[in-house]
Amino acid sequence: MKKHKLLFFALILLVAGTLSVTLYSCKTSKPAVSSSKGTVLQKNLGLQLYSIRDSIMRNVPAAIEKVAKMGYKFVEPANYANGKIYGMDPVAFKDLCKKNGMFVICSHVNEALPSAENWDKAMAWWDLCIDTHVAAGCKFLVQPSMGGDAYKDINVLKKYCDYFNAVGAKCKAKGLRFGYHNHDQEFSTKLDGQTIYDFMLKNTDPSKVMFEMDLYWVVEGGANPVDYFNKYPGRFELWHIKDKEEIGASGKMDFAAIFGAAKKAGLKYGVVEVERYNFDEYTSCKKSIDFLNAASYVVMPK
């Protein structure tokens, strides 16, 4: 009798254990919340391909495959010329990214401020550029810099703002958002008592021009990103998430406070950029996304 009771209880324990494992498996089959102890959620983050500038031109397909395997969901190219992206037809580049489970969110392109005589030529350049990136599936186009005179003469800076409004109108007509990407000089330089970045925000039309804020260069320029989010809410639809080297390596960036104000900023997409390295390009890019995926305060829009 005792033997039968022991077998009966053993059977109950076995069934209970099986149910417990099954229930646990059902729970953990859903995407995990970021945790240092468990599986890390792959967040909606992209990579600025300038981060792998030394290798991507040697083999574009291999580079895109490596970026996708790190967990990046989209890319931001930085190599446009004559209707090609990294020397590829835009649809072919789009398909390459799609094959690897990614899409093309934005592209950095640069056309200098034209003179009155060259205005039509510049607008034709933008027409081809815009059509190319529409074909690639882009949602944004970003000019990453201005000429040196814009930092010396407020009249030139105003011409840039007017130029960006005109380009922004062209982009808007084709379903793209146009924007400007900063460096540190926009914050460390004043013209007629006005910080360059503030002047640009005040003299560009929000319906035509958004700003891709490079978080690291803001701090390097002596400013605080959160102050700008509060002062100009909704203008910063893209971010370059960056640090001195790999993200989180310097300890200088208050990413918790910055991400805490993401809604105020108007953030739609976050793009990782690594300009300097403690490791090889790909290791640095992987460490950067791993840091953001593991950080509980990093919540990205879908």
Image (spheres, rainbow, N blue to C red):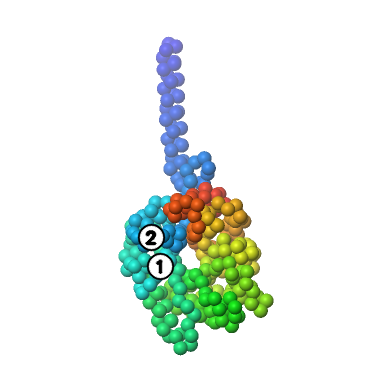
What amino acid is found at the position of numbered circle 2 in the picture? Ile
Distance of mark 2 from mark 1, alpha carbons?
Answer: 10 Å
Q: Which mark is residue 56?
A: 2
Residue 57: image location, x then y, percent: 36, 62
Amino acid type assigned to the residue bearing label 1 in the image: Asn
Q: Is residue 232 left or right of residue 50?
A: right
Residue extending furthest toward the right: 193
**Looking at the image, is mark 2 or mark 1 earlier in the sequence?**
2
The picture quadrant where one finds residue 236 is bottom right
Image position of 55 with respect to 184: above or below: above
Residue 286 pos. (x, y %): 46, 51
Q: Mark 1 and mark 2 in contact (Cβ < 8 Å)?
A: yes
SS at badge 2: loop
Label 1: which residue?
A: 79
Q: Quarter of the image containing the N terminus?
A: top left
At 38% from the left and 60% from the top, the residue drawn is 56
